[in-house]
Image (spheres, helix red, strand yellow):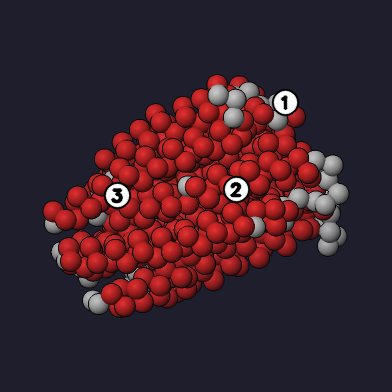
Amino acid sequence: MTWPQHLRAILTLGLPLIGGHLAQFSIGLTDTIMLGRYGAEALAALTLATAFYFLLFLMGCGFAWAVMPMVAQFDAQDDPTSIRRATRMGLWLSTLYFACVIPLLWVSGSLLLALGQTPELSADAQTYLRIAGFGMLPALLVMVLKSYLAALGRTRIVLLMTLGAALANGIGNYALIFGRLGAPELGIAGAAIASVISQAVALVGIAAYAHRRLPEHALFTRLWRPDREMFRRVFLLGLPIGLTTLAEVGLFEATALMMGWLGTVPLAAHGIALQTASATFMVHLGFANVATIRAGNALGRNDPGHLRRGATAVFGLSLATSCLTIIAFLTLPEALVSLFIDPDDPARDAILATGVSLLAVAALFQLVDGAQVIALGLLRGMQDTRVPMIMAIVAYWCIGIPASYLLGFVWMMGGVGIWSGLVIGLAVAGVLMLHRFWSRALRM
């Protein structure tokens, strides 16, 4: 393929995936905006709750993400039986994982108290998590089916289903948080109920599509039958992916806990800045998914030249996205942060000032964050997950988290120092992942 053909193929596959990630992200963004207008206390509790929830959820997504490169490889080899087997065992593993973590969500208030959060924030966060936790199972199953469909090139339906879920969440939030459309005013509990409803809508829609449009795979026929060999393969590929994600998300969630030690206003500002930075990360994540799929296809065809040229093209698109993001964060910080704050909130000025300073730091990690997630996506496509897991643990937990604590509390830099530790951890991970990928790709 020529360079324009590579770019066209990446964008054709990637733009719907990016849109789907942004639509999925909008579910959390809607919660943040609406609860931010409901009150600073509710926003701070949501920030704490979603940090805890996504730490567990994204680790469980490792099994769903393992399905993507496997299905891409089997599709290139024209092996529908293995496609069905891998996807089914991804559904099995996601369900078993949910059964293991739901008790943690139920006792989350005690865990957050033990981690130094205030009783009021911990109680409100637990209220959210006890309800939203039941949406984790459909959310995990949706992730498996999204990976299956995306690996087959069916990315538009992934976008449409996610948009439907986001719409359901937005309407539910409006009704249940503020007590509109005849519903009771439930505040943070209403946001949790709306999230569960949106995940259920997404699961029903995407499962119905897979059943009707891809009958040759018969995903749900005799779904209860075990497949030990494929269960083991998906588990061994997915567990390192989940632990790698845990390491990265753990870095961000550790910073949320540290910001909570500084008080409600810094924590609320952290939530706003993180939501803003996460929106741009969804673009890189979409490109990383494309990288995984195309690397999996190249692996199935044993075509290293295609892998290297495609990798160069996707890195270039990620770099262009990072440059645009840096410009926006440095020139429009107040406008971006103001979107999340009620103009009449008495803490508005303090949250705005802190949020603007955090966005300036967020601009620093756009390049390294994009580079590391693309490299990680390519390595997953090559089904190389164990060494990247070790690299992630070292970069995020051994370097990033200690750096955040030292800069934030020992060197008394506060929130800016805590976020600077993020930059250091992501930069180390980016260098290690890039070196790992290119050294392997050039040896092929």
**Which residue is at the far front?**
331
Instruction: Please provide percent x and percent y for residue 394.
Output: 35, 33
| Residue underneath mark 1 | 119
User: Which of 176 and 279 lies nearest the eye of the viewer?
Assistant: 279
Q: Estimate how packed mark 1 is, as few (under 14), some (14 to 19) or many (20 or more) residues with alpha carbons within 10 Å.
A: few
- Using the rendered view, name the quadrant where residue 30 is placed: bottom right
| Residue underneath mark 3 | 434
Residue depicted at x 60% and y 48% = 359
Cβ atoms at labels 2 and 1 below 8 Å apart:
no
Please state which of the two labelled residues, at mark 3 or mark 1, is closer to the viewer: 3
User: Under tag 1, what secondary structure?
Assistant: helix
What's under tag 1, amino acid-wise?
Answer: Pro
Image quarter of the N terminus: bottom left
Label whose residue precedes the other's in the sequence (3 or 1): 1
- Using the rendered view, name the quadrant where residue 415 is placed: top right
User: Which of 141 and 322 lies nearest the eye of the viewer?
Assistant: 322
